[in-house]
Amino acid sequence: MNSFREIKVWQKSMDFVTKLYKTTRIFPQEELYGLTSQLRRSAISIPSNIAEGFGRKSPAEFKRFLQISKGSLFELQTQIEISKNLNFLEQKKYVELYNDLKEIEAMLTAFIKSIK
């Protein structure tokens, strides 16, 4: 693997960031520096930590950054749940985003296990 761009979970999480940004455009303006910002930061953290970990010198460090990505993913799941509870997300969009995150979670888990 020559680049982190070849990592499928990085690609999937990058697609998710784009989807989340488009979704949060409809959130209330007063949430721009609150929940909207937090959702976006958590989403960006997932592929960013995969990329940063890829650039580290050891498999152990890479795994640590993948675990950090997974932590950001769990934060994001919680924030999406909050968004649904506040009626910022319709049920259909919530399910779509949550299912995307469950897929990314499974990919991250498998990827972490594959690193020796």
Image (cartoon, rainbow, N blue to C red):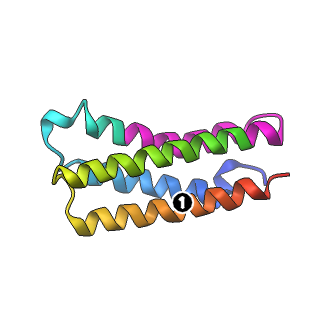
The residue positioned 23% from the left and 66% from the top of the image is 91
Q: From what the image shows, is residue 97 above or below residue 43?
A: below
Q: From what the image shows, is residue 35 above or below residue 107?
A: above
Q: Can the viewer see residue 47 in this picture?
A: no
Magenta highlight on residue 107: no
User: Where residue 78 appears, x then y in whole percent?
Assistant: 37, 48
Kindly identify the amino acid type of the residue bearing the numbered disc 1: Ile
User: Where residue 32 appears, x then y in whole percent?
Assistant: 22, 34
Answer few, some or many: residues within 10 Å of disc 1's Cα (few below 14, many 20 plus, some between 14 and 19): many
Asked whether, in this view, residue 9 is left or right of residue 57, the answer is: left
User: Where residue 52 appears, x then y in whole percent?
Assistant: 65, 36
Pointer 1 residue? 104
**Which structural element holds mark 1?**
helix
Magenta highlight on residue 42: yes
Q: Can the viewer see residue 79 in this picture?
A: yes
Asked where in the image residue 56 lies, by quadrant, the reply is: top right
Quadrant in the picture for the N terminus: bottom right
The residue positioned 22% from the left and 48% from the top of the image is 25
How many marks the image carries: the answer is 1
Q: Identify the magenta region.
A: 40-62
70, 47: nearer the viewer: 70
